[in-house]
Image (cartoon, rainbow, N blue to C red):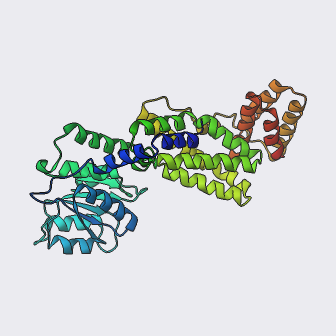
Amino acid sequence: MILGKFATTVREKLHGSQQAEVEEEVVKELQLYTREGKFYILIVDSGEENVRLIRETAEKTGCEVTVAENGIACMEKAMKDRYDVILLTLSMARMDGLQTLHNLRSVGGSRCRDSRVYCMLETDEKRDEAELLADGFSGVVRKPVQEAAILDIIVRNAPQKMLPDDEEFLEEIKTRAEDARKLEGAGIFLSSGLASCGGDMNLYREAAKTFTENYRERSLAAASSLFAAEEREYMDLVREEREACRELGVSRLSDAFDDHVNMAKDGELEIAELHLHKVMEEWEAVVGRFAEWLDIPKPESRIDEIFHAKTNGIRLSNKDVLERIEMILDSLKETEVVIAGERITKTLNYVLKDITRHKLFVAREEIGNGRLERASAILSAML
């Protein structure tokens, strides 16, 4: 099943008034009781999109939100007003997040000595989160901060009297935030994916399961069409995977697929071939994380199978490789399928360039699938 078509089915199920009803429920469920006071949040960040996401989510719950663009502006506000929660970017010029945190806790006149301060890291920023907690941060989130994480922070820090009486719902918010945290390390943004499913976690899990289980079939199809120089077929397939990623909130892999579409569109198929290895690594990271989260078997790694297999340690020259490919093609012309497969296997025992190994491996798979013309096209393109 192609996930893009599956995602369309999901949207159709939620079409019209039913979808509107679900979306309204998701937005309005968490409402703080603010008759006896407000819950104040300070965002310290210069990124407009991240600030917008946090502000919209927090304000819908009834929070009062203030923004400071940097550490210095944060301290100016902290000297005037007290905030219950501060979301503080770690990497900032002049006064970074750690120095700002220290100042909030120690500078005389600070009204935020006991505020809960959460560290905001960039998406791919490499920091030891345990060390940041030891430094005094109340928690660590990554930008763009997901809706699930924002709601979780509010629920964990708002006074009990401000929270709804529904304990089951509050636990659901915490669980969803934990799910989002598990997934975001692989560039998967649960909040974005759930929005495509109208907030229905069961539909999202079904879509993620489909995407994961289809990995080996779809990654083979992508490599096969690319190596056979079937430009249109390749572009269509990768566009479908890109849209599936967007539906699931899988940002980094979606961007990688987008880059490949642009390479193919510009006629740079050879460059796309060389970069396919990196796309597959990202793809496998995503399906591996989904499999762990869904508690289903992890798809076998094509990366390990192709590039990390043991060899005899002998490197073949380009001339030897080409001679062997011609012999394999001769076997296919004579419909000696078994012999062709055996010749590829013997060639793969040698040390080869990564791209050569990948193409031979895919050609052998296509022979095994009975797609002899496609295997021949891949091998012929190597000559």
For image coordinates 66% across by 45% down, the residue present is: 237
In the rendered image of this protein, does residue 18 appear above or below residue 339? below
User: Which residue is at the far front?
Assistant: 17
Q: Residue 315's image quarter?
A: top right
Q: Residue 263's image quarter?
A: bottom right
Q: How many labels does the image show?
A: 0
Asked whether the viewer can see residue 282, the reply is no
Residue 337, percent from left and from top: 82, 26
Nearer-the-camera pick, 55 or 273? 55
Asked whether the viewer can see residue 9, the reply is yes
Q: In which quarter of the image is the N terminus?
A: top right
Nearer-the-camera pick, 284 or 172? 172
Residue 160 is left or right of residue 206, and the answer is left
Residue 362, percent from left and from top: 71, 37
For image coordinates 54% across by 51% down, the residue present is: 254
For image coordinates 81% across by 41% down, the residue present is: 377
Residue 250 is left or right of residue 336, and the answer is left
Nearer-the-camera pick, 74 or 126? 74
Residue 99, percent from left and from top: 25, 67
Residue 86, percent from left and from top: 23, 61
In the rendered image of this protein, does residue 13 appear above or below residue 238? above
